[in-house]
Image (tube, rainbow, N blue to C red):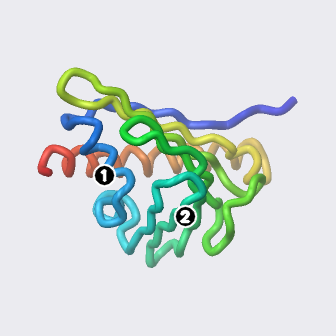
Amino acid sequence: MHEDISIEHDLVIDAPPERVWSLLTDPDAIRRWYAFDGAVCEAVNGGRIEHRWRQHGRFLGKVLQVQPYGLFQYRYAARPETEPQPGASTVVTFRLEPEGAGTRLFVTEHGFEQIAGSMVEARELAAVNLTAWRAGFATLSDLARRR
């Protein structure tokens, strides 16, 4: 039996979708809340993603879908310095929905079972990534309020 291991998280950010979108797609903004040692983000279908951390390395991605202010999806390599190929990557999806004066941001990431050696390892990787997303989103929320 094959089990799909994925993570899902959502939060409301006190900023309009346009501002949240810019924080998700602008390389300087990404550096401030997530990839602290640099980022590349070509927010077009087929565009390149690159996140850098001195302690972890350079992680590469490829944009799969873009609907400005609504949907941003990319395939993300599981290991540093590797191309984001099926079977060696996850798929990250950000979905933005207006909510009052703010934005509800949904993130999903799936494919952990394809990159791990076991289902236990897949669940552990998913838990680590969920913790990282939550920490990053706390900073992203603060940045959204200050812009």
Q: Quadrant of residue 25?
A: bottom left
Asked which secondary structure carries label 1, the reply is helix
Q: Are marks 1 and 2 in contact (CB under 8 Å)?
A: no
For label 1, count other residues whose C-alpha is less than 10 Å away and answer few (under 14), some (14-19) or many (20+).
many
For the point 20% across and 37% down, the residue is 15
Position of residue 9 relative to residue 50, above or below, is above
Residue 58, percent from left and from top:
53, 73
Q: Is residue 52 left or right of residue 136?
A: right
Whole-percent x, y for residue 48 in the image? 54, 64
Q: Amino acid at mark 1?
A: Leu
Q: Is residue 110 above or below residue 34?
A: above
Q: Quadrant of residue 20?
A: top left
Q: Residue furthest bottom?
A: 54
Residue on which disc 1 sits: 23
Give the residue at mark 2.
Answer: 48
| Left or right of 100 in this view: 118 | right
Whichever of callouts 1 and 2 sits on the residue coming sooner in the sequence is 1
Viewer-nearest residue: 69 or 133: 69
Q: Position of residue 3 (x, y in %)?
A: 77, 32
